[in-house]
């Protein structure tokens, strides 16, 4: 009986073998095609994630710089009234108390405030008498008739204005002629 079973197994093996080989070849071909597709999809996903991360990094750097600039502007806006008061104090005692040590101390503090603003990139808006009025930089609070100045020219500066990186912190308050 044993011999008969071996013979039957040997007889059926040659019939099944080509079918198994064909199925294995098809499965291998499917795996190869799927692998190539999977590789392309994975590479595409990786490239997109890398680009998104790079964009996020650049955006984060810009946001941090903008936050820093906003902080500088906010602190400078609070310092501007102090600087104005120091300049008024210096102007009131410039002629009479120029040799006084108190006046010199006030003058030193005012210069230090001005140096701080310069270090932070904050500059004074040009508003000298005789230059043309610019509504983006100047705030006209008065209008005068003066033959010494042309039309729409600044005749007097009432309060200094300041700018930081092309953003106006405070407009210059000016009197405009003619």
Image (tube, rainbow, N blue to C red):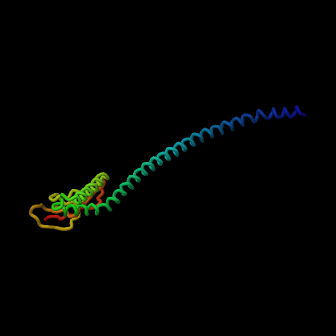
Describe residue 54's horizontal placement relative to residue 36 as left or right: left
Q: Where is residue 80 drawn, in percent x and y? A: 29, 61
User: Who's the residue at 48% across and 48% down the image?
Assistant: 53
Image quarter hosting the N terminus:
top right
Q: Is residue 134 visible?
A: yes
- Using the rendered view, name the quadrant where residue 13 is placed: top right
Describe residue 157's horizontal placement relative to residue 63 as left or right: left
Of residues 15 and 63, the one nearer the viewer is 63
How many numbered discs sit on the rendered protein? Answer: 0
- Using the rendered view, name the quadrant where residue 18 is placed: top right
Q: Where is residue 32 drawn, in percent x and y? A: 61, 38
User: Who's the residue at 70% across and 35% down the image?
Assistant: 21
Describe residue 178's horizontal placement relative to residue 79 as left or right: left
- Using the rendered view, name the quadrant where residue 153 is placed: bottom left
Q: Where is residue 138 drawn, in percent x and y? A: 23, 61
Describe residue 161's horizontal placement relative to residue 4 as left or right: left
Q: Is residue 135 visible?
A: no
Of residues 78 and 148, the one nearer the viewer is 78
Q: Where is residue 150 drawn, in percent x and y? A: 12, 61
Image quarter hosting the C terminus:
bottom left
**Outermost residue, left side:** 147
20 is higher (above) or lower (below) than 54: above
User: Who's the residue at 81% across and 33% down the image?
Assistant: 11
């Amino acid at each position: 009986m044993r011999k008969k079973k071996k013979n039957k197994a040997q007889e059926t093996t040659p019939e099944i073998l080509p079918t198994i080989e064909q199925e294995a070849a098809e499965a291998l071909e499917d795996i190869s095609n799927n692998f190539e597709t999977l590789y392309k999809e994975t590479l595409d996903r990786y490239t997109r994630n890398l680009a998104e991360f790079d964009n996020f990094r650049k955006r984060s750097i810009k946001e941090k710089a903008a936050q820093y600039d906003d902080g500088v502007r906010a602190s400078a806006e609070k310092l501007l009234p102090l600087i104005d008061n120091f300049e008024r104090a210096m102007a009131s005692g410039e002629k009479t108390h120029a040799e006084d040590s108190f006046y010199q101390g006030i003058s030193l503090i005012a210069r230090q405030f001005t140096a701080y603003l310069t270090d932070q990139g904050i500059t004074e808006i040009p508003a000298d008498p005789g230059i043309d009025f610019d509504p983006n930089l100047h705030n006209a609070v008065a209008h005068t008739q003066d033959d010494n100045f042309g039309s729409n020219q600044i005749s007097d500066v009432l309060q200094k204005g300041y700018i930081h990186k092309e953003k106006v912190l405070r407009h210059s308050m000016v009197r405009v002629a003619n």
